[in-house]
Image (spheres, helix red, strand yellow):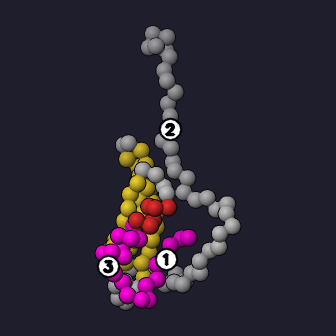
Amino acid sequence: MKDDQISPPRRGRRVPQTTDSRHALGIAPNLLRRNFHAEEPDRIWLADISYVPTDEGWLSLAAVKDMATMEIVGWSMSERLKGSLAVDAMRMALQNRRPTSGLICHSDR
C-alpha cells in the first residue's frame, strides 16, 4: 500500500449532537428566573450534561451542583447519552444529601 500511495481514509473526531428539540414536550417553568444565589445548602441544585473528550472517544457526564456550597452532589458518566445518565446523577445527589422540602432543581430542560 505504501509503494502505491494507498492509505485508509482518515476520520475526523466526531462531535456529539447535544440537543434534539424536535418534539412536542412542554417546557417546565423557570422558577429561578436567573437568580442562582442560595442562602443555605439543598435549596437550589443545578443539573446539566456535558461531554468529555478522551483518547478512546467521548464520554457523557451528568452532574448535579448545590448552589450554596458549589459542590457536585451527584454525578454519572457513560459512553452513551441515555435517560438513565441524568436519573443516576440525581439519584446519587438525593442519596448523598437527603434534602427536605423546598428544593428546586434547575436544568436547561
Decide which of tag 1 and tag 2 comes sooner along the chain.
2
What amino acid does circle 1 point to? His
Q: Which mark is residue 22?
A: none
Callout 3, which amino acid? Arg
Magenta span includes 100: yes
| Residue at numbered disc 3 | 97
The image quadrant of residue 22 is: bottom right
Residue 87: x and y in percent read: 44, 67
**Disc sitting over residue 106 in the figure:** 1
Mark 2: few, some, or many residues within 10 Å (few <14, many ≥20)? few
Q: Amino acid at mark 2?
A: Gly
User: Magenta part of the protein: which range?
Assistant: 89-109
- Badge 3 density bin: few <14, some 14–19, many ≥20, Cα 10 Å: few
Of 69 and 94, which appears nearest the observer?
A: 94
Up-down: is 3 above or below 22?
Answer: above
The residue tagged 2 is 12
The answer to whether residue 86 is above or below residue 11 is: below
Within the magenta stretch, is there residue 80? no
From the viewer's perspective, is residue 44 above or below residue 53? below
CA distance for labels 3 and 2:
42 Å
Say if 40 sits above or below 93 in the image. below
